[in-house]
Image (cartoon, grey):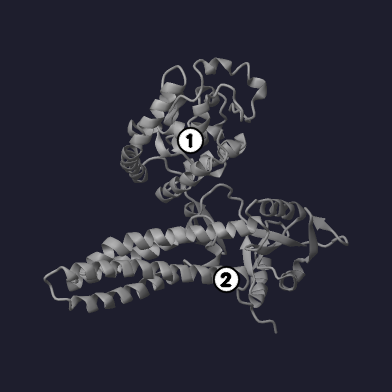
Amino acid sequence: MVTPRTRTGWQAKHRARVRLTDAVVVGTALIAAYGMQAAFDAISPRSVLGLPMHAAATLLLAAVWLAALATSRAYDVRFFGRGMTEYQKVLDATWKSFSVVILVAWATQFAEARGLLLVAFPLGMVGLVLSRYAWRQDLLRRRRRGEGGMTTVLAIGDRPQAARLVRLLNGAPEREFVVVGVCLPSGGIRPDEEVSGVPVLGDLDEVGRTAHEIGAGAVAVSSSHEITADDVRRLGWELERYGVDLMLTAELADVAVPRITVSPAPGMSLLHVDTPRFEGPKFSVKQVMDWGLTALLTVLVSPLLLAITLAVAVTSRGPVFYLSNRVGRGGHAFPMVKFRTMHVGADRDVTTLAAANEAAGPLFKMRADPRVTRVGRVLRRYSLDELPQLFNVLCGHMSLVGPRPPLPHEVAVYEERMRRRLLVKPGMTGLWQVTGRSDLSWEESVRLDVYYAENWTPFLDLLILAQTARAVVSGRGAY
């Protein structure tokens, strides 16, 4: 009898590293909070008898916090290096832990809890997210280098569906899944047959044994008229004996997981896809976030704004700022402000340089654009020319995060799919910025903008803002 195997290899190692790092972060945050409370009690006229109680509360919170991380599935290997679910699990566990602290402190009049709330909560939350981000980057680097960190998959389906699955999974640059074999539901398998470069290893009757022999971590079943619900049910029972995951593909490209729910129905399960919403409380939250963060950023970067203003003014003739007519939410035009990075009259030279255009679609981009000034090249490389758009955000024309602000002549040739970008405000940064900036193809840029418009969340905005800082510092894809 074959016994189910436990998860080993990169999954077990990665989970152990994350657990250890989480424990260190939680311990550090709570020790800092305890130290602050101890220092406060040392200069307080109150008795220091409160310190032992505070120490006990600190240890209890550490246990509750780490338990909350475990019960919130923050260590589920299926979330490592994939989407935002891992971060959401960490934040949910932290909120739950400190909700317990607040309730206990209120019920027991435990005043020392303020140190835990003021220090441990923000320090721990930031530390946990940053440590998870660091481990994720390490995992992605190992995947890019071919050093592991991937789940081997056995693909099941008709030849066309299996070929598409192989192309999508094996073609991803930071692939989480790699298809190493294919099983076809029908007979007529030719010797040494391959599907998109992956060997065909058998038919539907040999899936469990084949998956076990090749060490597959999962079996992915594509849609096929020859694979019935009973076949999938029996396959699940068979894979259970080998400890192999079963995955069913769903053709729901560019639909975020939070919009998908499973609704039970007689004899089947229905995937319900929520309709995208472009107004309501969530957008009110976004507006408040935009105004608050933008006002803070404007104050923080004001010395830099002044320095760039002087640099542009003394190095080339013309105005410091450049106003570009852009199209915003609902197709309404607005003047987008940037620092001028080109010589005056550069707009008129576009037609003469059209043959040197390196961008796809209606965009115009040149890596060595002769119209750009010396200071302009530096500003463009690090996106400093876009800082005045903070004033566009304050005026309500733009958002901190959103689709790329298009030009009127670009919008004039938009197809219906592209016009969905106009359902939300354009942003200073977005998925296009953190994914590849000017290196993206036109189609990929449109896809990312439409995905953002239909699936954005406040947490996604915060994550994009954090990744934007990294993209700007590296200067990757900007010209």
Q: Residue at x 48, y 32 (%)?
A: 379
The residue wearing badge 1 is 383
Q: Is residue 259 left or right of residue 177?
A: left
Q: Work out whether residue 179 or residue 13 is closer to the camera in this orientation and state it.
A: 13
Q: Is residue 102 left or right of residue 203?
A: left
For residue 13, which numbered disc appears in the image? Answer: 2
Bin the neighbour count of mark 2 within 10 Å (Cα to Cα): few under 14, some 14-19, many 20 and up: few
Q: Could you say which quadrant of the image residue 36 lies in?
A: bottom left
Asked whether residue 392 is in view, the answer is no
Q: Quadrant of the N terminus?
A: bottom right
Bin the neighbour count of mark 1 within 10 Å (Cα to Cα): few under 14, some 14-19, many 20 and up: some
For mark 2, give the secondary structure: helix
Q: Is residue 274 above or below residue 364?
A: below
> Outermost residue, bottom direction?
1
Q: Position of residue 263 (x, y in %)?
A: 49, 59
Marks 1/2: CA distance? 38 Å
Chain-order first, disc 1 or disc 2: 2
Q: Residue at x 49, y 16 (%)?
A: 344
